[in-house]
Image (tube, rainbow, N blue to C red):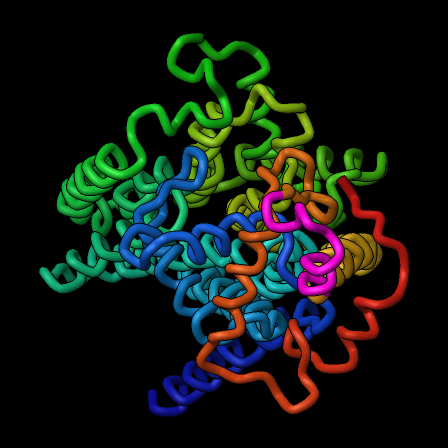
Amino acid sequence: MTSIAAADRLKNVCAAVVLPAVTVLLFWRSGFFFIQDDWTALSQMAENPFARFLVLPDGEQWFPLCHLVFYGLIRTFGDRYSLLVLANCIGTGLNALLFHALARRHLGFAKALALSLVYSAAAAHHAIAWNSFYMCYVLSLGFLLGALLLNDTYARFPSAARLAGIGCCALCSVLSHNYTLLALPVIPLYPILAMPPGVGRAGWRAPAAMMGAVYVLFSVGYLSFAGSMAAASHNQAVFSSIPGPAYLVHWFSGSFLSPFLYLFWGHFHFPVWDYVVSITLVGLGVWVILRWGNSAEKRLAAWACLFNSLPMLLVSLTRYTRPPGQAFVARYAVFTLLGALLLLGIAWTIVERKASSRRWFALPAAALAIAMIAGQALSLPRWLDAYTRMSRASLRFYQALDAGRRSDPDFLDRPFNEFWMDVRIPLTGRQFLEIRRMLEAAAVPRGKNGGAGGTGPEIKGLASSGPLEVDR
């Protein structure tokens, strides 16, 4: 018994080291700088008192916990952007570890580790790791996974402390990013669908009541600080029209098609072969589960589908009026990849059980793994180039603020948006100068040779070379 416990501890330590390390090694880069939504949040920080900044809405979103954490990171590290990227990488790796802990309860250590490694290395993480403000997604997913793990324990060993922990994690999840608002029902549904009937069905009522309390608290905060019309920021007709086929297409694409496409390719311009392989894999996986899966496997698969589809019901409602490709943005895949990987793991377990020989199963499994690894490796450089060019343009502008102020008499009041997406609200020269003063007051001083970005001569060289074109 002692040897088994020691082996389990060793396995846990290995997973805890390997999963975050993979994400950090693959995604931690030193050549990036503030872009896009970073600047919006920085301008809000520079122009508002701390308490006001915490409760400011961001479009239809209201996430004060995200603002709190981002405020702390910026006040600590300032424009040392590589450290902000590192924080996002570590957080993503820890989420992979939480996913491993959840998947291990159903698929065993080896399968859970393999699937978690796929997640930790997925090229879709570029969208989070390389944009510092998007740590809101990392926090939101991490708290949701924490609530699920606590719920798994609560169903077996109920206690007031565990129930309070479930509620706190759920509330922190929606206060970090509102993507998980409609994901909260998967917490009380987890013991019903994903756990043995004798264990789980007795442990869902109290968590369900706790989710109701979370919704009440969030609604009061949202209506008080964001207002009822904030939900219409991206879709002005959200309250006045009935969603049609475009809504269903957006929801289905984001929930089920997109995550399987991201398993084999990390850029939303997916090649034709990726569509063929991904759709085939979805069809085969669902068929295997329905044809040969036992009742527990089918219930777990149903829960995985709900994990992906429930949050997208709300996301699609606010975004389906945009071009169809919006459903395939990598930010959503950071969540939905987990449901897709669970479905893949369930089908893997069933096929392995049914296969007459492990050798018969090994060849297609190896081919699938090679295709996933190759797709991620080949698509990531495209994103690396795009983010590098956006960062280069942003940093050149940031470092030339004083020169611009001297040479342009209208600099302070002129709006600038040369280095970010056209849909963003441009900031004025005065706002950029206020942001710079705030960043320079960070608690962690720059190194002797460190410029903005915290990488010294490397990023200075990046800022002074190459074209200024940015992917739009």
> How far across and down, in percent of the image, does residue 202 sit?
16, 46
Give above or below for 69 relative to 134: below
Q: Main secondary structure of the magenta part?
A: helix
The answer to if 4 sits in the magenta stretch is no
Q: Observer-nearest residue: 50 or 206?
A: 50
- Judged left or right of residue 362, residue 5 is left
Residue range (magenta)? 400-413
Q: Quadrant of residue 50?
A: bottom left
Q: Observer-nearest residue: 163 or 55?
A: 55
Quadrant position of the N terminus in the picture: bottom left
Quadrant position of the C terminus in the picture: top right
> How far across and down, in percent of the image, does residue 372 sit?
75, 54
- Judged left or right of residue 303, residue 252 is right
> How far across and down, in percent of the image, does residue 334 sit?
56, 50
Of all residues, the one furthest to the right in this rendering is 466
Whether residue 258 appears in this view of the structure is: yes
